[in-house]
Image (spheres, helix red, strand yellow):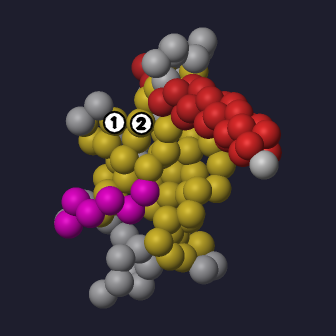
């Protein structure tokens, strides 16, 4: 048996949707803050299974909220999604990565100037 493949579709009106390709109807759980969410639905589609996850209202607040989708029987991770709301946190990992990229670009330009001046 192969592990189902999850493809995100959309997040709209508080409902996250994805598509699962699996041999048989997958049994999934969605975890948020260590708890399993209620109301998760899997329904048949032409080429697999549609997954619908109602996002709790508590997750639609300031901060970064991560959801992990796992196989119910195996607890193997099938996918995840993240919701970021409100003012971006100063210590948000994405902000840190962007800052590091900008600093790296600055260092590369300075290094290239130094190299071209040495010749």
Q: Residue at x 51, y 15 (%)?
A: 89
Q: Nearer the viewer, mark 2 or mark 1?
A: 2
Q: In the rendered view, does 86 fall on the left or right side of 118?
A: left
Numbered disc 1: secondary structure: strand
Q: Position of residue 100 (x, y in %)?
A: 56, 32
Q: In the rendered view, does 74 fall on the left or right side of 43?
A: left
Numbered disc 2: secondary structure: strand
Q: CA distance from mark 2 to mark 1?
A: 7 Å
Between 48 and 1, which is closer to the camera in this rendering?
A: 1
Q: Which residue is mark 2?
A: 66
Q: Which residue is mark 1?
A: 32
- The residue range painted magenta reads 74-79
Q: Residue furthest front?
A: 119
Between 56 and 99, which is closer to the camera in this rendering?
A: 99
The answer to whether marks 2 and 1 mark residues whose Cβ atoms lie closer than 8 Å is: yes
Q: Position of residue 40 (x, y in %)?
A: 41, 49
Asked if one can make out residue 14 in the rendered structure from this viewpoint, the answer is: no
* Residue 104, above or below 17: above
For residue 75: magenta? yes
Q: Residues within 10 Å of mark 2 (few under 14, many from 20)?
A: some
User: In the picture, which quadrant includes the N terminus?
Assistant: bottom left
């Amino acid at each position: 048996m192969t592990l189902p493949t999850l493809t995100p579709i959309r997040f709209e009106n508080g409902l996250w949707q994805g598509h699962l390709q699996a041999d048989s109807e997958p049994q999934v759980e969605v975890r948020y803050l260590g708890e399993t969410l209620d109301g998760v639905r899997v329904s048949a589609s032409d080429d697999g299974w549609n997954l619908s996850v109602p996002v709790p209202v508590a997750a639609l607040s300031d901060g970064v909220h991560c959801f992990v989708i796992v196989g119910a029987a195996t607890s193997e991770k099938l996918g995840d999604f993240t919701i970021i709301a409100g003012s971006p946190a100063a210590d948000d990992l994405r902000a840190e990565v962007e800052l590091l990229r900008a600093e790296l670009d600055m260092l590369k330009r300075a290094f290239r100037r130094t190299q071209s001046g040495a010749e």
